Image (tube, grey):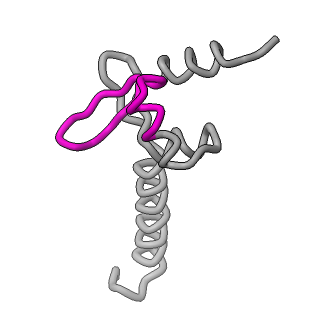
Amino acid sequence: MLNRKSKEIDSFFTALAELSSLIQQAMKNRTPHLNGEKFLSNSDICQTLHISSRTLQNWRDTGIIPFIQIRGKILYRQSDVIKLVENSIVT
């Protein structure tokens, strides 16, 4: 007979908890996509380029880095960020 204390039910809830944890981690690490283009947030850019949010704001204000704003959310095309980095490399 199956009840809350049975081994099968306990195994089911353990597996369900692990699956829930994996889904939460995947959602936290996801990157929004639109027409195949990946978009990055302010924190993504700051962490990746090791810059402050103020520096990033200055780059937006001066046109150094292109961005889009949707309902107050600022996003950056990953391809634009890659171009910025490639154009900044000194050889």
Residue 38 visible in the snapshot: no
Tell whether 39 sits left or right of 47. left
The front one of 66 and 9 is 66
Picture quarter with the C terminus: top right
| Residue 86 percent location from the top left of the image | 65, 15
Q: Quadrant of residue 61?
A: top left
Residue 31 versus residue 27 in the image, above or below: above
Tell me what residue is drawn at x 64 percent, y 44 percent. Answer: 50
| Residue 28 percent location from the top left of the image | 44, 52
Residue with the most extreme bottom position? 5
The front one of 35 and 91 is 91
Tell whether 33 sits left or right of 89. left
The front one of 14 and 4 is 14
Residue with the most extreme right position? 91
How many labels were placed on the picture? 0
Tell me what residue is drawn at x 77 percent, y 15 percent. Answer: 90
Tell me what residue is drawn at x 39 percent, y 19 percent. Answer: 37
Picture quarter with the N terminus: bottom left
Residue 3 versus residue 31 in the image, above or below: below
Residue 19 versus residue 27 in the image, above or below: below
Q: Which residues are magenta?
A: 57-77
Residue with the most extreme left position? 71
Q: Quadrant of residue 12?
A: bottom left
Tell whether 54 sits left or right of 68. right
Residue 20 visible in the snapshot: yes
| Residue 54 percent location from the top left of the image | 48, 48
Tell me what residue is drawn at x 45 percent, y 78 percent. Answer: 10
Residue 72: say if magenta: yes
